[in-house]
């Protein structure tokens, strides 16, 4: 009996994740403040809800990617695991540090207080870009496995 193949599920999770981050972080978030009638307070309130929900969904997708990666881990190469480790670190920094700090800053603004500029928002944005690049690389590696185009497998060396 053939072993179940987790690669298509990982591919689906990674593709969904890429789409969610691009749609929310790079399209919805900047456009929200350009909509007529959206105040800073309203935009921040919506942003807190949306990014909280996105983070929860991302953690679920990270769990799916983790399980499907560990399921047949020997089939994945070193590059995959380095990228995966970077993804886990990125999610840890965003979920455990940056999002709580950004949420607290938004709450302070919503209470009517002014706050000094900080590097947290830019740091989050840079990590979002790097995360999409990492997710895309993991997606391509997983796609190669689903399609059977694994590098150096089944080929004889010449020369």
Image (tube, helix red, strand yellow):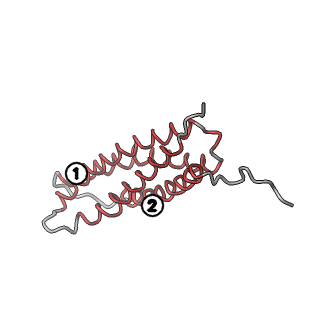
Looking at marks 2 and 1 on the same chain, the residue that comes earlier in the sequence is marked by 1
Q: Is residue 15 left or right of residue 85?
A: left
The residue labelled by disc 2 is 129
Q: Position of residue 25 (x, y in %)?
A: 35, 59
In the figure, is residue 138 to the left or right of 15? Answer: right
Tally of numbered tags: 2
Compared to residue 80, the image places residue 72 above or below, namely: above
What residue is rendered at 46% in x and 57% in y? 132
Instruction: Looking at this view, name the residue that lies furthest to the front.
Output: 1
Q: Which residue lies most toward the right here?
A: 159
Q: Residue at x 29, y 65 (%)?
A: 30
Quick one: label 2, few (<14), some, or many (20+) residues within 10 Å?
Answer: some
Of residues 40 and 149, the one nearer the viewer is: 149
Q: Which residue is mark 1?
A: 108
Per the model, the C-alpha gap separating discs 2 and 1 is 27 Å
Q: 53 or 149: nearer the eye? A: 149
SS under mark 1: helix
State the quadrant of the C terminus: bottom right
Q: Residue at x 60, y 30 (%)?
A: 1
Which one is closest to the eye, mark 2 or mark 1? 2
Residue 108 position, x and y percent, is 22, 51
Q: Answer with left or right where residue 151 lies relative to residue 35.
A: right
């Amino acid at each position: 009996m053939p072993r179940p193949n987790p690669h298509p599920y990982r591919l689906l999770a990674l593709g969904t994740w890429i789409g969610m981050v691009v749609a929310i972080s790079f399209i919805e978030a900047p456009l929200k403040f350009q909509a007529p009638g959206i105040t800073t307070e309203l935009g921040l309130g919506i942003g807190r809800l949306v990014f909280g929900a996105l983070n929860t969904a991302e953690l679920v997708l990270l769990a799916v990617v983790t399980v499907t990666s560990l399921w047949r881990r020997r089939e994945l190469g070193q590059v995959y695991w380095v990228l995966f480790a970077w993804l886990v670190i990125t999610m840890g920094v965003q979920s455990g540090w940056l999002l709580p700090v950004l949420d607290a800053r938004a709450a302070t603004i919503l209470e009517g207080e002014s706050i000094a500029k900080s590097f947290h928002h830019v740091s989050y944005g840079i990590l979002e870009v790097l995360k999409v690049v990492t997710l895309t690389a993991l997606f391509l590696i997983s796609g190669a496995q689903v399609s059977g185009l694994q590098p150096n497998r089944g080929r004889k060396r010449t020369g």
